[in-house]
Amino acid sequence: MATRIIYFTVNGRPEKAEFLPDCPAQDVKDLFRVAAEAGPHDILKLYNTNGSIINISPHLEPNNPHACYKLEVVAADCNRKPLGEELTVALGFDLSSMEKSTLEVTDEVRQYLKTPTFDNWQWEDTEIMVLLQVMYTDLDFISTFNIEVEVLQQFLYEVYRRYNNIPFHNFKHCFCVTQMMYGLIWLTDLRTKMESIDLLIMLTSAVCHDLDHTGYNNAYQINARTELALRYNDISPLENHHCAVAFEILEKKESNIFRNLTTEQYKRIREGMIKCILATDMTRHNEILNKFKSILSSFDFGNKDHKDVLMMIMIKVSDISNEARPMDVAEPWLDCLLQEFFNQSDMEKLEGLPVTPFMDRDKVTKPSSQTGFIRFVLFPLFIELANLFPCLEQHIIDPVRKALDYYTEMEKALDKEKQT
Ligand code: 5GP
Ligand code: MN
């Protein structure tokens, strides 16, 4: 069989790819990827001489050097695969090294871990895994639910691997949300008010709540008719996926931290985690907040429905709690979030999809993004949780108020600058 030769340019540089017409499609894609010096998650677009996009496959129409195709590297892939082994190696991490982490978990660190002022930027991924282990230990989950340490480590490792290396919805974000949940559990003394299994559901939901996030939100998934939107019929495609990936990990015996529980307990945890993770879809924000408000005056920890709503509120608060952190921790997170937002809106523009307004780099600034979000989303939510637990006022309301002042000032300064 004769080899096929395709001529093309990348950034004006002439290149060629040679392959057999019956070779695997992936091999052909890889040839182009290497030629373009593209990363494993970048999107490649190949154009013919008419400027039409053509599929990179073994069936590519052969051409000649005078009628080159044009190859473009567009942007990071919206359906990127989970961290591959190569990245794991690049990060210098493997499971056996986790136990050897040099992190010394002093009592001081253990206490600090329980507070929302915890600086989540200073930790390496290996250290984060140790800190997550500390949380499971200090909430007595290990002993209460007979969780083997190796299984917990394997679980955390699988979780780590299935967060993507994207600006915001990455493993560190998972850690931030989990650590806030952990802090809230201690601050509100929830251990005396709820069953241990509910706390296990809340913490594990936080750990899993954004698994395999691709950096493109539900609106994008639906408009771009991605695989996820198709699979879940446009109904919370991302959250359904995060949760499904969580249970994929838990289905494996070696990473199933619930493997020593009864069928009944497992069922309850599964039901609870599905509820919690699906509750992180922000389009359900008002629905869930209104439900919580309607039960607040008669809140009863003995009532399962009440507890379910509280659990959803707790994960929602943890999920969007960056601004409750000290400014020097919160602000870099906002930069990461905006970077991811802008990536999405750039992609929407490129693909001719509706552009999500709050992600548009031509419309959004740091302060404008935060003042609206704090006034209309954060405050109304946090205030209700603080209604149930007044002790939270100083921990989550005060810092958010400070952040609002800060960004309001910044917004004014920007406006002034524009006028002059
Ligand atoms: P997540 O995607 O992390 O599960 O859900 C939280 C969503 O709330 C984010 O995707 C983002 O749209 C929004 N969000 C969270 N924190 C902030 C913030 O500090 N500022 C703004 N503008 N949006 C936020
Ligand atoms: Mn999240």
Image (cartoon, grey):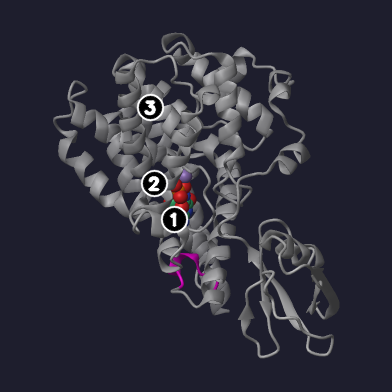
Q: Earlier in the sequence, mark 2 or mark 1?
A: 1
Residue 39 point in image, percent of width and height: 73, 58
Please give the residue where the numbered disc 1 appears in the rendered image: 228
Q: Is residue 114 magenta?
A: no
> Which is nearer the N-term, disc 1 or disc 3?
3
Q: Is residue 402 visible?
A: no
Please tell me which residue lies in front, 322 or 397.
Answer: 322
Coordinates of residue 279 in the picture (x, y in percent) = 33, 43
Q: Residue shown at 43%/38% (left/top)?
A: 318
- Indicate which label's residue lies in the foreground, 3 or 2: 2
Quarter of the image with the N terminus in it: bottom right
**Tag 1: Cα neighbours inside 10 Å, few (<14), some, or many (≥20)?**
some
Badge 1 amino acid: Leu
Q: Tell which residue pokes out farthest to the left in this image.
A: 298
Q: Which residues are magenta?
A: 355-362
Vertical side of 90 occupied by 237: above or below: below
The answer to which image quadrant residue 48 occupies is: bottom right
Secondary structure beneath dot 1 equals helix
- Which element type, helix, strand or loop, lies under badge 3? helix
Q: Nearer the viewer, mark 1 or mark 3?
A: 1
Q: Nearer the viewer, residue 284 or 54?
A: 54
Is 388 on the left or on the right of 86, as rendered?
left
Look at label 3 and name its amino acid. Answer: Ile
The picture places residue 251, in percent across and down from the top left corner, at 46, 30
The dot on residue 240 is 2
Query: What predominant SS class does the magenta segment belong to?
Result: loop
Mark 2 is surrounded, within 10 Å at the Cα level, by few (under 14), some (14 to 19) or many (20 or more) other residues, namely many
Q: Quadrant of residue 155?
A: top right
Kindly indicate whether the residue at mark 1 contacts the one at mark 2 (C-beta within 8 angstroms): yes
Q: Position of residue 389 (x, y in %)?
A: 30, 28
